[in-house]
């Protein structure tokens, strides 16, 4: 009778434990596609450890591709059980990053359950409650010493709490702890971002964000400086460029006629591309039926995309895109992932990558379908990308950088007076790249002007230097393409016939 009672008493406990165990489920959090064309990323830093409790939108880790670094956040509440990819290792898109235990009735837990761990923990049927995970004791990691050319190398001035770089979850957590984020800036995260660990350290009385010691050159000793992540990615990309057989081609473009046309184009920049001033509010007789009535809708242009004058670059990009539409070969890229036989993927539009030298390193944002954009719209796109690139940390995102262009353009003439360059192609960086030099006035004594009374003419010449992937583009093809581009650049009136 005693045994029967013992069984009767134990049965509800076993049922309770079974019901509790079934309410928890492991989910595999996978690396999503963070940008078109990006197939793998390096896990730079984990913000969590096994047994750490995470909430929705809490930072999980930071990953770095060859083009950008992205912080990945948790999609649901739960407990991290296992990290599947170590720091410094490469993860493929679609590969599992970590295992998170979530409640089965959690509406956000919609992914397929994770497979059973390779080393399962022996069951403990007599336990009714699962002990809570130990609190995370991770202290804020020491910040990396940035490159001396990075403006963040210098000490940053204190800023208002609203402008402190921090994720929404960290802001909420700081608010619940009664901590002013302005007192924690700069934080220990990337670009001075304030992390949850910074808040915990501040609450515990520790320094919120210990700054790296500044080393001066006055002692005559060498200084070892760790490269930032963007420059490290550039390092790896340049090493990979050795896999591409390069073919070079240099010439000059006569932009004298374009030079005479620019003042006219600048004078008539559409209103929505110009910074707004009081005179713009003057009544326009053309709008007698009402503002905007019967007119095409005007696109919303942010302040970063507005400008007051045109330069040569938008026109050169527009004519380059127009030429690419006649040359499918220069709108193609090597098919990725590689096929059994070498193949090319031809794009329907002209995608041009623009090389930007920024305070944090080299970026190549993409002007997508540049052939469909007007010169004024391209000028706005370039201004916006340049403004975002100058921010620290960079304002460029995977949406700006993903996919790459089939041709890259580097405007090195804006930085120096060089007349030649050797631009470098990297795998996945398209089939050609051109470096634009600085335009200079020259006395042209070629056959075209030799027979004039002056035995020559003063012309504005723009040096250009090309490199092409010789696996795809033949030398004669590149030369013919450049001559086709020249026919547009040196005769800008042709665009009138195109309705541009």
Image: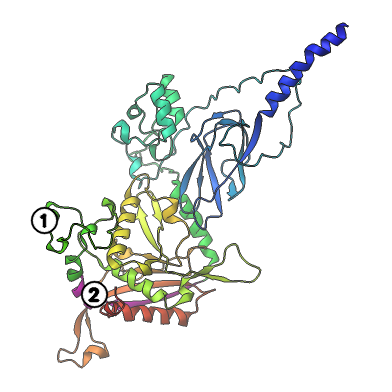
- Which marked residue is nearer to the observer: mark 2 or mark 1? 1
Whether 260 is among the magenta residues is: yes
Residue that protrudes farthest toward the bottom in the picture: 451
Q: Nearer the viewer, residue 399 or 46?
A: 399
Q: Which residue is mark 1?
A: 282
Residue that protrudes farthest toward the front in the picture: 289
What residue lies at 36% left-to-right and 42% top-to-bottom? Answer: 220
Q: Which residue is mark 2?
A: 258
| Whether residue 307 is visible | no
In this rendering, position of residue 18 left or right of residue 35: right
Disc 1: CA contacts within 10 A as few (<14), some (14-19) or many (>=20): few
In this rendering, position of residue 112 left or right of residue 48: right
What percent of the width, then of the height, locates residue 67?
46, 53
Real-space CA distance between mark 2 and mark 1, rounded to the nearest whole angstrom: 32 Å
In this rendering, position of residue 233 left or right of residue 287: right
Q: Nearer the viewer, residue 318 or 69?
A: 318
Is 329 drawn above or below residue 291 in the view shown? Answer: below
| Whether residue 459 is visible | yes
Quadrant (top left/top right/bottom left/bottom right) for the C terminus: bottom left
In this rendering, position of residue 135 left or right of residue 280: right
Q: Which residues are magenta?
A: 246-262
What percent of the width, then of the height, locates residue 422?
41, 68
The local secondary structure at tag 1 comes to: loop
């Amino acid at each position: 009778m005693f045994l029967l009672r013992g069984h009767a008493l134990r049965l509800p406990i076993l049922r309770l434990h079974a019901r509790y165990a079934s309410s928890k489920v492991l989910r595999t959090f996978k690396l999503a596609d963070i940008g078109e064309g990006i197939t793998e990323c390096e896990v730079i830093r984990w913000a969590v450890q096994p047994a750490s409790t995470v909430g929705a939108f809490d930072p999980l880790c930071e990953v770095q591709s060859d083009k950008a670094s992205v912080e990945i956040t948790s999609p649901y509440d739960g407990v991290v059980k296992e990290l599947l990819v170590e720091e410094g290792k490469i993860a493929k898109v679609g590969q599992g990053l970590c295992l998170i235990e979530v409640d089965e009735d959690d509406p956000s837990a919609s992914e397929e359950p994770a497979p059973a761990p390779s080393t399962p923990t022996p069951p403990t049927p007599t336990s009714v409650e699962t002990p809570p995970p130990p609190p995370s004791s991770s202290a804020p990691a020491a910040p990396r010493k940035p490159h001396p050319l990075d403006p963040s190398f210098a000490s940053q001035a204190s800023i208002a709490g609203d402008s402190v770089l921090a994720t929404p979850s960290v802001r909420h957590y700081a608010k619940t702890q009664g901590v002013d984020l302005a007192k924690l800036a700069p934080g220990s995260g990337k670009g001075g971002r304030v992390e949850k660990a910074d808040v915990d350290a501040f609450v515990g009385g520790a320094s919120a964000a210990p700054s790296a010691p500044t080393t001066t050159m006055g002692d005559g000793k060498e200084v070892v400086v760790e490269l930032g992540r963007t420059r490290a990615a550039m390092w790896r990309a340049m090493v990979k460029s050795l896999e591409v057989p390069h073919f070079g081609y240099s010439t000059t473009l006569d932009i004298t006629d374009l030079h005479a046309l620019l003042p006219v184009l600048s004078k008539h920049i559409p209103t929505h591309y110009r910074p707004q001033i009081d005179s713009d509010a003057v009544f326009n007789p053309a709008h007698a039926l009402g503002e905007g009535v019967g007119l095409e809708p005007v696109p919303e242009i942010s302040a970063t995309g507005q400008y007051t004058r045109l330069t040569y670059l938008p026109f050169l990009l527009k004519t380059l895109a127009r030429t690419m539409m006649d040359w499918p070969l220069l709108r193609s890229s090597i098919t990725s992932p590689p096929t059994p036989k070498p193949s090319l993927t031809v794009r329907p539009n002209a995608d041009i990558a623009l090389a930007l030298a920024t305070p944090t390193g080299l970026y190549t944002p993409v002007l997508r379908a540049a052939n469909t954009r007007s010169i004024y719209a391209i000028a706005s796109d370039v201004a916006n990308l340049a403004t975002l690139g100058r921010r620290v940390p960079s304002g460029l995102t995977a949406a700006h950088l993903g996919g790459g262009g089939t041709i890259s353009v580097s405007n090195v003439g804006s930085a120096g007076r060089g007349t030649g360059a050797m631009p470098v192609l990297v795998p996945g960086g398209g089939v050609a790249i051109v470096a634009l030099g600085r335009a200079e006035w020259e006395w042209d004594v070629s056959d075209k002007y030799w027979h004039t009374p002056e035995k020559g003419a003063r012309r504005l010449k723009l040096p250009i230097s090309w490199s092409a992937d010789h696996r795809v583009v033949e030398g004669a093809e590149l030369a013919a393409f450049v001559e086709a581009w020249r026919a547009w650049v040196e005769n800008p009136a042709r665009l009138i016939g195109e309705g541009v």
